[in-house]
Image: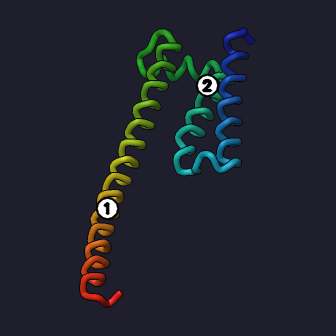
Amino acid sequence: MQLVQVLSIIVSALIFLFVIELIRRGAFKEKYALLWLLASVVLLVLSIWRRLLDYLALMFGFFYPPSFLFLLGFGFLLLITLHFSIVISNLSEKNKKLTQELGLIREEIDRIKKAGKF
């Protein structure tokens, strides 16, 4: 095994274990960690099984396998960005609805106070 391959196996395994530890501590929710776990497993498999990386790279038309890894990494980052954009959009909508409901509740409380019922 080459030093680069050993290093990539170690880094991939550490990423996987780090994500598992964050989930275990409750610092990382499972639904957000799924993409990270998937990416670390893919990196680990491609690090261990070098011929698979070479085969996949050639199958997709890449003559230099590390450039294929770069494409996979870029695709992973796009998926993470898309996922978090969806989460932020949903949270923004929920925040807007909560703010509107809070305004209506405050208006109702003020109306009840003015009527002398409170």
Say which residue appears at 68% left-offset and 15% top-offset.
5
Instruction: Please give the label number shown on residue 99.
Output: 1
Q: Can you identify the residue that label 2 sits on?
A: 46
First in sequence: mark 2 or mark 1? 2
> Would you place residue 112 above or below residue 78 in this image?
below
Q: Residue 40, how many percent across, how many down?
A: 61, 32
Say which residue appears at 34% left-offset and 64% top-offset.
98
In which quadrant is the N terminus drawn? top right
Q: Residues within 10 Å of mark 1 (few under 14, many from 20)?
A: few
Name the front one of labels 2 and 1.
1
What kind of colouring is applied to the model shown?
rainbow
Q: Residue 27, how many percent across, how many down?
A: 62, 46
Between 44 and 53, the one nearer to me in the picture: 44
User: Amino acid under label 2?
Assistant: Leu
> Would you place residue 34 above or below residue 3 in this image?
below
Give the tally of numbered discs: 2
* Quadrant in the picture for residue 108: bottom left
* Quadrant in the picture for residue 12: top right
Q: Residue 52, how many percent across, how many down?
A: 59, 23
User: Amino acid under label 1?
Assistant: Thr
> Would you place residue 30 above or below residue 63 in this image?
below
Question: What element does badge 2 sit on?
Answer: helix
Instruction: Please give the label number shown on residue 83.
Output: none
Circles 2 and 1 in contact, beta carbons < 8 Å:
no
Say which residue appears at 66% left-offset and 19% top-offset.
8
Real-space Cα separation, disc 2 to disc 1, in angstroms = 48 Å
